[in-house]
Image (tube, rainbow, N blue to C red):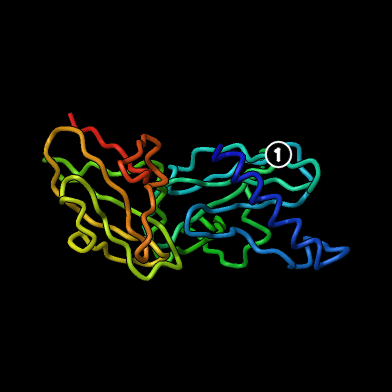
Amino acid sequence: MRKFVVKFVVILIFSITFRYVSGVNFEEGYFTSPVITSEYILFIYTNQAKSVKLLMDIEGWKPIPMLYDEKMKIWYYVYEKDIKKGKYRYRFSVDGLLISDPLNNLKEEDKLGGVFSVFELKSDIEIFRSNPKSLGNGYFEFRYKDLKAEKVVLSGSFNHWSPYELEMKREFGGIWRIKIYLPKGIHYYYFIVDDGITPDPLNMRTVRDKHGNIVNVLEIK
């Protein structure tokens, strides 16, 4: 399901761009690469080729095959892994030839004169696939993402459903976090987002309480 959503986003980005820039020529600098979001990095290559691979320092320069979109006539790769903020180098292998990214003006040379493309992350990219995250020794981190929320509280059977006690801390990118200790057993919880009960979208195990609210189930063994 997530791959379908990412694919749709990739197509949507280019569709919107083409809608406002008719007769676009990729080589004239209308596009930049990579496209960095809070959840993934989109690498783009627009010239003709039989094979394009992405090589990144963070991946030990292991070649990663890029995908070709027949409709848009572009090569792309969506990188979806946790990455710490900082500067990173990468290259493309186009039909076996190592080149820098033509759509990225940020480049660096190594001591041997090799040219690398560069991108810099101002903040960490963290992919949320499940919730909560086990930190060991009985501690868990609950995470919730909402750019518009003013206040998020974790409420559950472990704190008698208090709507005030476990207020989560907001971080960059609309990410809310809280770390708590939980004993072994079955626990029930939900988030209270701006006074509204909201089930955890990253935990598909749910039941309904006596009031009809959807609550999440967490079993700690």
Identify the image quadrant of residue 20.
bottom right
Which percent across, then down, holds residue 129? 41, 42
Q: In the drawing, does residue 82 fall left or right of residue 53?
A: left
Observer-nearest of 188 and 6 = 188
- Foreground of the two, 8 or 150: 150
Q: Quadrant of the N terminus?
A: top right
**Structural crowding at the residue carrying mark 1, measured as other residues with C-alpha within 10 Å and reported as few (<14), some (14–19) or many (≥20):** few
Instruction: Identify which residue is drawn at 43% across, 61% down.
Output: 146
187 vs 125, left or right, is left
* Identity of the residue drawn at 62% across and 63% down: 104
Position of the C terminus by quadrant:
top left
Q: Residue at x 34, y 64 (%)?
A: 195
**On the rendered structure, is 51 left or right of 131?**
right
Instruction: Give x and y (percent) for residue 69.
Output: 74, 42
* Residue at disc 1, secondary structure: loop
Residue 46, percent from left and from top: 74, 52
Could one spot residue 85 in this view of the protein? no
- State whether residue 196 appears in this view: yes
Residue annotated with mark 1: 95
Q: Amino acid at mark 1?
A: Asp
Who's the residue at 53% across and 53% down the image? 41
